[in-house]
Image: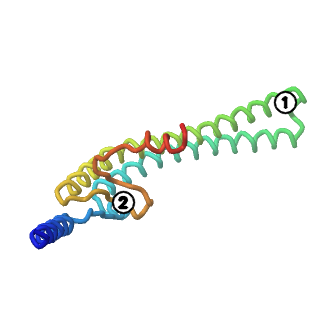
Amino acid sequence: MFRKTSICTLIAIVFLFQQAFSQTAPKYGHMNLGNLLEVMPETKKANDDLKIFADKLAAQDDSLTKAFEVAYRALESEYNSGVLTPVQLQTRQADLQKQQEFIQKFEQDAQQKVAAKREEMLKPILTRIEDAIKAVAKEAGYLMIFDTSAGSMLYAAESDDVSSLVKKKLGM
């Protein structure tokens, strides 16, 4: 009887070890998203189009700045030659101040427009990459894929949200 129990126990232990070792270890992967983006033809085209867009805005900025410089030199020349009354000088200085403020606002708006255009152009590329990452992860059985260029997670398998457990542990 004792021998029969120990053999059954031994078989059960062997079976448990076999089950434990037969399960595959979780797979984690990594990639450099920045390097991938850099070599994609779509990114090169987006960057080229963005450069054209930014260059147009820069040309407008240059034109505004040159017009300001011309107006400033004209005011300086007229002031030095004494043809302006104090009231005319104040009016022209106020006009130059407004022109300078307009240029500064234009430059800020241009930066925002370029950033928005870049985001708009990269969004479909990033969505395509994200879909490919998800497909690779599911096909190859990866639980998580990390981006080594940014230190962020690109993909995580569906799992339990432990937020409520952590909140409970924190007494929340």
Q: Residue at x 43, y 52 (%)?
A: 51
- Which badge, 1 or 2, is on the more N-terminal residue? 1
Q: Residue at x 87, y 43 (%)?
A: 80
Give the amino acid type for the residue marked by disc 2 in the picture: Phe
Give residue 84's quadrant in the image: top right
Which residue matches tag 2? 146
Q: Residue at x 30, y 64 (%)?
A: 29
In this rendering, would 66 be left or right of 25? right
Give the amino acid type for the residue marked by disc 1 in the picture: Gln
Residue farthest along the front direction in this orientation: 1
Which image quarter is the N terminus in? bottom left
Tell me where residue 144 appears, x and y as whole percent: 31, 57
Residue in the foreground of this view, choosing between 133 and 61? 133
Q: Secondary structure at mark 1?
A: helix
Residue in the foreground of this view, choosing between 120 and 60? 120
Are there few (<14), some (14-19), or many (20+) residues within 10 Å of tag 1?
A: few
Which numbered disc covers residue 128?
Answer: none
Distance Cα–Cα, label 1 vs label 2: 61 Å
Residue 156, above or below 77 = below
Which residue matches tag 1? 90
Give residue 26's quadrant in the image: bottom left
Q: Secondary structure at mark 2?
A: strand
Q: Residue at x 44, y 59 (%)?
A: 150
Indicate the colouring scheme: rainbow
Are there few (<14), some (14-19), or many (20+) residues within 10 Å of tag 2?
A: some
Residue in the foreground of this view, choosing between 84 and 115? 115
Which image quarter is the C terminus in? top right
Nearer the camera: disc 1 or disc 2? 2
Tell me where residue 157 appears, x and y as whole percent: 28, 51
Tell me where residue 44 appears, x and y as whole percent: 33, 57
